[in-house]
Image: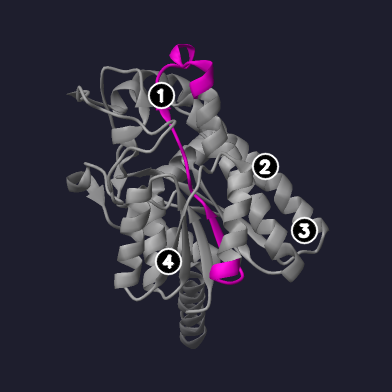
Amino acid sequence: MSSRCVVVTGASAGIGRATAVAFGKRGWHVALLARGLDGLEAARREIEQAGGTALVLPVDIAEQAEVEAAAARVEQELGPIDVWVNNAMATIFCPFERIAPADFERATRVTYLGAVWGTLAALKRMKPRNRGCIVQVGSALAYRSIPLQSPYCGAKSALRGFTDALRSELIHDKSRVHVTMVQLCAFNTPQFDWGRTCLSQQPQPVPPIFAPEMAAEAIIWASEHRRRELWVGFPTVKAILATHIIPGLLDRYLARTAYDGQDTNEPLPHDRQDNLYRPVAGDHGAHGRFGARARSSSWQLWLNTHRRAITGAALAVLGAGALLLIGLS
């Protein structure tokens, strides 16, 4: 295990930080890609204290040349890349018509094109070796968009479409490189403290809220199993299925509830900074300010990642019941 290498983008904070540390605790060589040097260095220390190896690479994931250069350095210093996790993102809390075009473009370049450039760099190295896994960190919002986050919802939807096209191309080429997408729900991360907003109050994730370590475990599981998609949390399941069944009703429901659902009624701090164009100084860690409300586990995720055991147990019960009936007859 200690010779395996993973690249995590957006590794300075939030889910990327939790994922990088979780890989490091398992003995992986971890390449940490993000813009925020303070957070990257703190993540490196966490990984090394846990006995892992980390390489800090300050990168603007929206720039293809920087991503490619980082990938080359990873393979030079840590060895062949086994797993690439596309997690970096940027969001804007604002009605669409009030978002500046340049801001919309920047959020899209980070969240969507950043994952495209990461996938390109990973495939360039994995495909000739005919092995490796690319994990696209997605969202229930890739299926069911919500108001006030149109750039993020659009980017995650685009990433899902891109990934589906790429997956078919890899199947056509008979490649063993695996591409999977992990669809997440709401997590307690710093993005709600530093995402750009035009609103007058602090934003929040739409409850229920989960701890970022749960997402990290799901991402690692997805990297080790050839699942096409992994849905994480029952809210994700509800959002995706309801989108297919009652999309129009959901449009109206979200129009009534999703504005207040993303609002904390707390005024914005006068010195609030956002990370759309530059990182916010300091180490912000994996967690946001909603720790008291964050759940650390999900029964849905446990069931989803233990399908074989559950199926085997169910068949065993059915078999025992059948034998009992035969014996009684």
Q: Which residues are magenta?
A: 76-103
Task: Calculate the distance from the C-alpha at mark 1 to the C-alpha at mark 2.
Answer: 26 Å
Earlier in the chain: of badge 1 and badge 2, it is 2
Q: Which residue is mark 1?
A: 254
Structural crowding at the residue carrying mark 4, measured as other residues with C-alpha within 10 Å and reported as few (<14), some (14–19) or many (≥20): many
Q: Which mark is residue 106?
A: none
Residue at which label 3 appears: 171
Name the N-terminal-most of marks 3 and 2: 2
Relative to 12, 221 lies left or right: right
Q: Is residue 135 visible?
A: yes
Q: CA distance from mark 1 to mark 3?
A: 37 Å
Which amino acid type corresponds to the residue marked 2 in the rendered image?
Answer: Phe
Q: Secondary structure at mark 3?
A: helix
Amino acid type of the residue that numbered disc 1 sits on in the rendered structure: Leu
Of residues 68 and 166, the one nearer the viewer is 68
Residue occupied by mark 2: 162
Left of 299 or right of it: where is 102? right
Q: CA distance from mark 4 to mark 1?
A: 42 Å
Q: Amino acid at mark 3?
A: Ile
- Identify whether 33 is placed above or below 112: below
In front: label 1 or label 2: 2
Q: Residue at x 52, y 20 (%)?
A: 102
Which comes sooner in the sequence, label 1 or label 3? Answer: 3
Give the number of the mark in front: 2 or 4: 4
The CA distance from mark 2 to mark 4 is 30 Å
